[in-house]
Amino acid sequence: MKLMKKESDLVVLRKLFSLYAKHNRSTIVYCVLATFFDGTKSYLPAMMSGVLVDLLVRGAVVEELLKTLIFWLAVIFAANMISSFMRQQFNARIENVMERQNLDMNEASMFMDYELLESAAFQEKKRRQEQITTHWGGIYWMLIWPLDNVLQGLFGTIAAVCVLVPMFFTAGKTRAWEFWLLSLGIAVVVAVYIRKMYVWLLKLNRTEKEEEDIISRLCRKSNYYRHAILFGAESGKDLRIFGQEKLVEEGACDREEEIAGHWSNICSANAEQAGKREMLSSLGIGGVYLYAALCAYMGLISVGSVVRYAGSILQCVKDIATMMAGVGNLRNAALFGREYLDYVTVEHPLYHGTIPVEKRRDDRFLVEFDHVSFKYPGSETYVLRDLNLSLDIGERCAIVGPNGSGKTTFIKLLCRLYDVTEGTIKLNGIDIRKYDYEDYVRLFSVVFQDYRIFSLKAGENIAAGEDVDEKLAWDALTRAGLKEHFEELPQGLDTFVGKEFDESGVNLSGGERQKMAIARAIYKAGAFVIMDEPTAALDPVSECQVYAGFDKMVGRKTAFYISHRLASCRFCQDILVFDGGNVVQRGDHEELVAQEGLYRELWEAQAQYYI
């Protein structure tokens, strides 16, 4: 697992824009075009007013005034029309910014190494992005709108320079020292304004980030109270039986009050900055008009130029403020964007293999664990330690042992959900890390303890996709003991599991869901069939049927069967007894029950309940 190193804000922003533009390049193009026309058209009214005032002072005839007025109105109209069109095109393309972020997050989650997906650190990053989407509209929204502000302010400032430069060439020729002294004064006012704006924005960004971090932690607790407990049907039974309603409700209310307090802090910080900005802006406006009036009084510029230049300077100050606000918000986006990039661009070591897995019709593969040790990320405790094991392919292998002995971890390593900490796992003599990952995992059909059946059609659940081979699906249901249940339903394999999307959907019991998970594993037809406690939710009759039909279910496949019920081991030719992260016994049921050891202790402890 390799996270993104600490990088500068500019590097982070470049990566974010590159990631967004990969699928939305036209959005950036229209943003540039829209802000160019928005930024430049703001100066046209002031220029028109200045020209008309100069014509009036000079005593121009009505015809000349009308021609000039019509010309400038036509220019302003054309600029507004083009600007409006570009803005509409831009707005239409930013409607999907949250969907784009969700797609990137979902894609990263689907192809992320399971080790990362299961880690608390990455789950926290995901929750943070969900929180940012809720509060700020998502990281791309935080990126695009500040870009809009920066470009609009930049183009506006460039336009202001183009308008103001002639004044410096004309007014500076006479009484130069007086003109440049006044210009220096207004430049100082603008510089102070920009400096103060930037300092306040940095302070506001820090405040928002600190408060958002606290809000995120509180929302995680609040959401757990509200969604996982208060609104959950499963938890509703315990709440009522044990009278926990008040405890949970108070916990939820306390979190909501704390969240409201921190949002109040953010609002106060924004209000404080807005007040300072308005006060400084008012002083700046006064300084600009004083500067223009003095220039006109001293005969440095014409009366019309007072209107033109004063309006342009004021607009320039506003554009600089807009640009600075955008810069501050882009910096804020960079602060939040680091976690986003950590999530969506993290390296995936599991996908580095390139060798294709040998295709064998007889499904004969040799698996070897060579001095394998493993500890979970962030832990110093070894779950498996120096495990050496060669597996007989094509047989039924039961895996038993106390809780925490390493059984499920053994399966996770075999399936490459995790990579070993030390040692090597080999398939047909080759380190499994060298195989193409997707090619390798096709070998495995697994029913995990924490399997999931989704609220989709039954056929889609079994086939794990929209393309369903009905013959294979019905065969899988038959071998899993669930065919009769769906044959009785009018829609058969098109019946939805659950009622989230269809009121005519069927609610399956825990045992029926487990049978469907078994059917999904059978349908995939992997070379290895792995079942981790596959009968835990089944009634005794169904469990007996699963045991009796196990050979039919898996056919010629190699089967690994994890169970705490040792009665299920009797149909397995090979039994691995795990304890303390290693295999302490191995053999068939008759051999192991006849010798001293953990297996016989477990067998006798369970057998007394069946006598």
Image: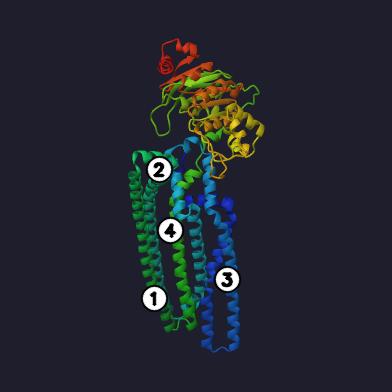
Percent position (x, y) of residue 499? 54, 43
| The one of 266 and 547 positioned closer to us in this rendering | 547
Percent position (x, y) of residue 250? 33, 47
**Is disc 2 in contact with disc 1, using a CB cutoff of under 8 Å?**
no
> Residue at 55% across / 57% down in the picture?
94
Name the amino acid type tagged 4.
Answer: Gly
* Mark 4 closeness class: few <14, some 14–19, many ≥20 residues within 10 Å: many
Residue ID for mark 3: 80
Q: Quadrant of residue 476?
A: top right
* Mark 1 closeness class: few <14, some 14–19, many ≥20 residues within 10 Å: few
Distance from the alpha carbon under mark 1 to that under mark 3: 29 Å
Residue ID for mark 2: 229
> Residue at 47% across / 83% down in the picture?
303
| The one of 452 and 358 positioned closer to us in this rendering | 452
Instruction: Please tell me whether residue 598 is drawn above or below residue 255 in the rendered image.
Output: above
**Is disc 1 in contact with disc 4, using a CB cutoff of under 8 Å?**
no
Name the amino acid type tagged 1.
Answer: Gly
Distance from the alpha carbon under mark 4 to that under mark 3: 28 Å
> Looking at the image, is mark 1 or mark 3 earlier in the sequence?
3
| The one of 445 and 62 positioned closer to us in this rendering | 445
Please count the marks in the image.
Answer: 4
**Is disc 4 in contact with disc 2, using a CB cutoff of under 8 Å?**
no
Residue ID for mark 1: 286
Q: Nearer the viewer, mark 1 or mark 3?
A: 3
Residue ID for mark 4: 328
Kind of element beneath mark 1: helix
Distance from the alpha carbon under mark 4 to that under mark 2: 40 Å
> Looking at the image, is mark 3 or mark 2 earlier in the sequence?
3
**Is disc 1 in contact with disc 3, using a CB cutoff of under 8 Å?**
no
In the picture, which quadrant includes the C terminus?
Answer: top left
Instruction: Please tell me whether residue 351 is drawn above or below residue 24 in the rendered image.
Output: above
